[in-house]
Image: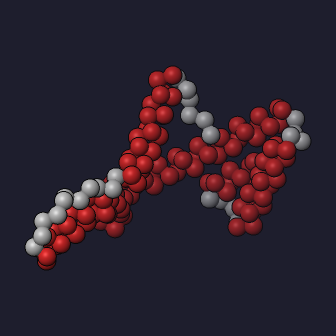
């Protein structure tokens, strides 16, 4: 069963063989989770699963390297594009839009009102969650905790 799954990950075999190997793995995982499996068999399955996940990660890393080194804007530029668009959208929504609205009000009516207060609640929640996740991993690294799934 595990041999078939390795073939599937490596890209060999027919679609039926690939689906069978995934189905068998799902059954084995279900049995392992329900506790019907001896501990040594469970440990063997966890080791094989970790090995498969490692191969999948290695494959994704290689794809990322190829995309990043590509001279084609379509392949290499989509990640930076998405990052910049998200940054621009955040800037517009939380900073620029309130000031543009205030400036338009002043220009159209001629009455100067108080400068708008920025609604930073959602933005701070996003920022702190991103920093928090980074902080938790830094704490784990400092304590010597290995990455576990």
Q: Is residue 111 above or below residue 61?
A: below
Who's the residue at 69% across and 43% down the image? 49
Q: Nearer the viewer, residue 141 or 136?
A: 136
Tell whether 87 sits left or right of 135.
left
Q: Is residue 94 above or below residue 135?
A: below
Who's the residue at 65% across and 59% down the image? 12
Who's the residue at 76% across and 40% down the image? 45
Coloration mode = secondary structure
Q: Position of residue 17 (x, y in %)?
A: 75, 62
Q: Is residue 138 visible?
A: yes
Q: Is residue 70 visible?
A: no
Who's the residue at 22% across and 69% down the image? 101
Q: Position of residue 114 (x, y in %)?
A: 18, 59
The answer to which image quadrant residue 93 occupies is bottom left
Name of the residue lying farthest toward the top: 143
Tell whether 128 sits left or right of 39.
left
Q: Position of residue 79 (x, y in %)?
A: 36, 59
Quadrant for the C terminus in the image: top right
Number of disc labels: 0
Tell whether 139 sits left or right of 31.
left
The answer to which image quadrant residue 90 occupies is bottom left
């Amino acid at each position: 069963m595990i041999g078939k799954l390795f073939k599937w990950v490596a890209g060999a075999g027919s679609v039926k063989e690939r689906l069978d190997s995934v189905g068998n793995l799902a059954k084995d995982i279900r049995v392992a989770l329900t506790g019907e499996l001896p501990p040594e068999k469970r440990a063997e399955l966890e080791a094989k699963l970790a090995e498969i996940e490692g191969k999948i990660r290695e494959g994704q890393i290689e794809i990322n390297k190829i995309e990043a080194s590509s001279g084609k804007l379509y392949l290499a530029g989509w990640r930076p594009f998405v990052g910049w668009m998200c940054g621009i959208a955040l800037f517009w929504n939380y900073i620029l839009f309130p000031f543009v609205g205030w400036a338009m009000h002043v220009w159209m009516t001629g009455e100067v009102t108080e400068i708008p207060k920025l609604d930073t609640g959602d933005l701070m929640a996003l920022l702190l969650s991103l920093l928090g996740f980074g902080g938790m991993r830094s704490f784990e690294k400092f304590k010597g905790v290995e990455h576990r799934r």
